[in-house]
Image: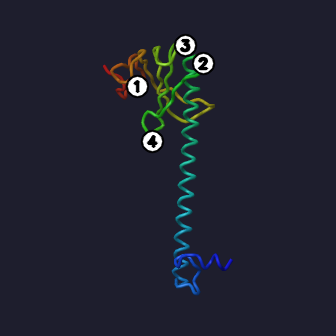
Amino acid sequence: MSSLVERLPGWLAPRAQDATPRRLWRLESAVIVALGGFLAIASINDLAQTVNTNTRLVADQRTWRTHTHRDYFNVSAAPLVLGTTLDLSCADATPGPPGERTQICLLIDGPVRGGLRSVVGGFRLPARRGDFPQYRYDCYGEARSRHLCAG
């Protein structure tokens, strides 16, 4: 064991006497503990936000299926504006390959209640078009009042 200690570089080898004053050592320890506490709180906060967002998006998909009376598997759900509770959920109006049919898009807001959220507006998108305001039609509710559709 002593041969192992002898082979260590000077900066890593144990010192005969600690050169750092005890008061400085306590301050360094307090800073490390405070930093660890801050990182733990930040991690827990991030995890809670992720769980909340995932719960909301699952509820958005279920709300789309309930509101449109279509039990489709491929229902997209995403926040419309990051940092808000307003989400956009879209899926095809009729069965078929994704993007090949007209889509029904719903604006969903509010808390999750009974696994569902409130539909506050929506619009339709024609097949094989990107989700751009100039292609959106049949707008109602928040989609119309927020001018998310052209015209």
Q: Is residue 23 above or below residue 72?
A: below
Count of all numbered marks drawn on residues in the image: 4
Q: Residues within 10 Å of mark 2 (few under 14, many from 20)?
A: few
> Label 2: which residue?
71
Can you identify the residue that label 1 sits on?
143
Label 4: element kind: loop
Mark 4 vs mark 3: in front: 3
Residue type at mark 1 is Ala
| Above/below status of 48 relative to 28 | above
Give the x, y percent position of residue 126: 41, 15
Which element is circle 2 on? loop
Foreground: 114 or 97? 97
Spatial distance from mark 2 to mark 3, Cα to Cα? Answer: 10 Å
The circle on residue 95 is: 3
Q: What is the crowding at mark 3: few (fewer than 14 residues within 10 Å), some, or many (at least 20)?
A: few
Return the residue at label 4. 83
The type of residue carrying mark 3 is Pro
Which part of the image, by quadrant, shows the N terminus?
Answer: bottom right
Q: Earlier along the polypeptide chain: callout 2 or callout 4?
A: 2
Mark 3 element type: loop
Could you tell me if the residues under marks 1 and 3 are in contact, i.e. CB atoms within 8 Å? no
Amino acid at the residue labelled 4 = Gly
Q: Residues within 10 Å of mark 1 (few under 14, many from 20)?
A: many
* Crowdedness near tag 4: few (<14), some (14–19) or many (≥20) residues, C-alpha within 10 Å: few
The spot of residue 26 in percent (x, y) is 55, 78
Q: Nearer the viewer, residue 72 or 122?
A: 72
Q: Is residue 112 left or right of residue 101?
A: right
